[in-house]
Amino acid sequence: MSEGYIDVPGGKVWYREVGEEGPEYQAAILGFYREHFCRLDPWPECLERSFAESGAHVYHVMNGPSEFSVTGSLKDWEVMDRLGEITIPTLVVGGRYDECRPAHLEEMHRRIPGSRFAILEDASHLCFAERPAEFAALVNSFLDETE
């Protein structure tokens, strides 16, 4: 696809193969991240630092220019059918507005025998930063049950 609207969680975005320099494309990515990656404003310093030091070259080789256009070496990587091989206690957790959609997280949970599943309301992918007390209580409860 050279240009057009594409579906993303929460709506549609105009996509044009302009790479990371295109201002419209970057604005769309930032809007997506603010809704589905981290809903805090301002973003925590640790998140800003991780973006600044993320190794963008490796990301581009493995993923491609963004979550909207996966063209890298992971393009055809699929492990959903192998999740049933997990035999250790597993907590699958995400936010209601997570870029990894709750339905997908729930599907992962269903495929992992005996796993526990939780969605934190009013949170996105960085639910641990957006809802730290709730996230800590959830993880601590999970760990208490598995020890």
Image (cartoon, rainbow, N blue to C red):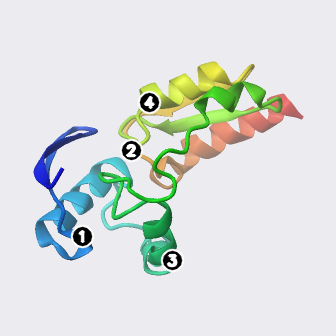
Q: Which mark is residue 19?
A: 1
Q: Which sits earlier in the primary sequence, circle 3 or circle 4?
A: 3
Secondary element type, mark 1: helix
Location of mark 3 (residue): 55
Q: Which sits earlier in the primary sequence, circle 3 or circle 2?
A: 3
The answer, for residue 5, to whether it is visible in the render is yes
| Foreground label between 3 and 2 | 3
Image height of 104 relative to 132, above or below: above
Location of mark 4 (residue): 102
Neighbourhood count class around disc 2 (C-alpha, 10 Å): few under 14, some 14–19, many 20 upward:
many
Residue at 11 percent across and 53 percent down: it is: 3
Tag 4: amino acid: Pro
Image height of 95 relative to 116, above or below: below
Q: Which residue lies furthest to the right in this view?
A: 147
Q: Quadrant of the C terminus?
A: top right
Q: Is residue 46 left or right of residue 13?
A: right
| Foreground label between 1 and 2 | 1
Tag 2: amino acid: Glu
Front position in the image: 119 or 104: 104
Q: Which mark is residue 99?
A: 2
Neighbourhood count class around disc 3 (C-alpha, 10 Å): few under 14, some 14–19, many 20 upward:
few
Front position in the image: 9 or 7: 7
